[in-house]
Amino acid sequence: MDFTFTEEQQAAVEAARAVFSGTAPDDVPSPALTTGAVADDFDRALWRKLADADLLGLLIAPEYGGAGLDPIALCLVLRESAKVLARVPLLESGAAALTLQRYADTALRTDVLPQIATGDLVVTVAAAGRTGHEPAELAVRATHEDTAWILDGTQTAVPWAATADRILLPAHTAEGHAVLALVPRAHPGVTLADQISTSGERQAEVRLDSVRISAAETLTDPAAWGSLRHLLTIGTCALALGLGERVLAMTSEYTGKREQFGFPLATFQAVAVQAADRFIDLRAMEATLWQAAWRLTSDAPGPLPPAGDIAVAKIWASEGVRRVVQTAQHLHGGFGADTDYPLHRYHAWAKQLELSLGPAAAHEESLGDLLAAHPLG
């Protein structure tokens, strides 16, 4: 493996840092201080800055107004976004855009991709299923009728659904095949019920009652849903890595200044060992993330399908980010729970990321299934 990033990928990181430099975690609404959702909408001002910096079209081909980069570039930008708790649907929009570019017909690509690149069309993704404990594609039933598809079912915990323009959601046919439908938020038969995430963000339960979607707005390629799910998973790992790195940096700064018995906390062996363990967690999260993103981007062969590397990355991301924020709270003492200090916000976001798209145990089970199907020599 070569972890050297291309000039284009490094330029995307620099552009992202410039945009996010004006975002302060202290200004992010706190779920501990808010009754209900922390806000009605995502950060539209930041979204516009991302669009102006051409960061919303990272994965979109140049002919549609994008930069034509790969998922690694998106993960690099997501990593930066998590450090400042950026409240924008960057992961969902980027994953949806690449999936549409790969599997939608020419007319649909021409219609939506330029608008996504400019930030004028916000697309989110439903990936949790009906309860969050079952395959997402089984939550909605898709029935083919003439030149349209009829959708019935419920998707829960859909991020940003209340204010996004379209929702890309999976459904299953009578034969058990997964299809993806690009459903307008305001559409006959679509009903939204408010939900709130662990991080305090507004989500929605999306109910579909005989929703009619034209075949032109449906992706029927068998690989489309799996590709989208993999993109969302590695993007979630990138968010967890960025958040964990920022939290460890905060902890290092605090323990380097806070004194006990006349000495900085960082000089105590017990503190240093715990911080070192969390540093190791972050390096493992980083290595497994780039391994998975590289497999997904390059289609390089391996002892397991790319899904195996993605499962390993999510296991490390879920376990690692949880340990990092727990250790940070411990080493900060009571100061870590002070609502005037941003650490509690990072803790809430970390728990959300830990469980998003399945906790470590779910991916350990998936990895076990892959190992059983592909025994290692």
Image (cartoon, rainbow, N blue to C red):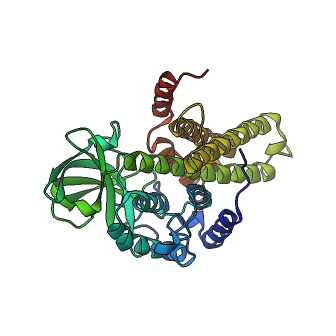
Q: Is residue 146 left or right of residue 184?
A: left
Residue 72, x across and y down, in percent:
60, 55
Judging depth in this view, the residue of 341 and 351 nearest the camera is: 351
Residue 294 is situated, as x and y percent measured from the top left of the image, at: 61, 48
**In the rendered view of the protein, which quadrant contains the N terminus?**
top right
Position of 142 relative to 376 (above/below): below
Q: Nearer the viewer, residue 4 or 360?
A: 4
Q: How many marks?
A: 0
Left of 236 or right of it: where is 206? Answer: left
Q: Position of residue 210 (x, y in %)?
A: 13, 54
Residue 37 seen from this side: no
Q: Taking the image as drawn, is residue 256 in sight?
A: yes
Q: Return the residue nearer the eye: 194 or 329.
A: 194
Q: Residue 265's x, y, as percent?
A: 79, 44
- The residue sitting at 70% across, 42% down in the picture is 283
Q: Is residue 182 above or below residue 63?
A: above
Residue extending farthest bottom: 52
Residue at (19% x, 54% y) in the render: 208
Q: Quadrant of the C terminus?
A: top right
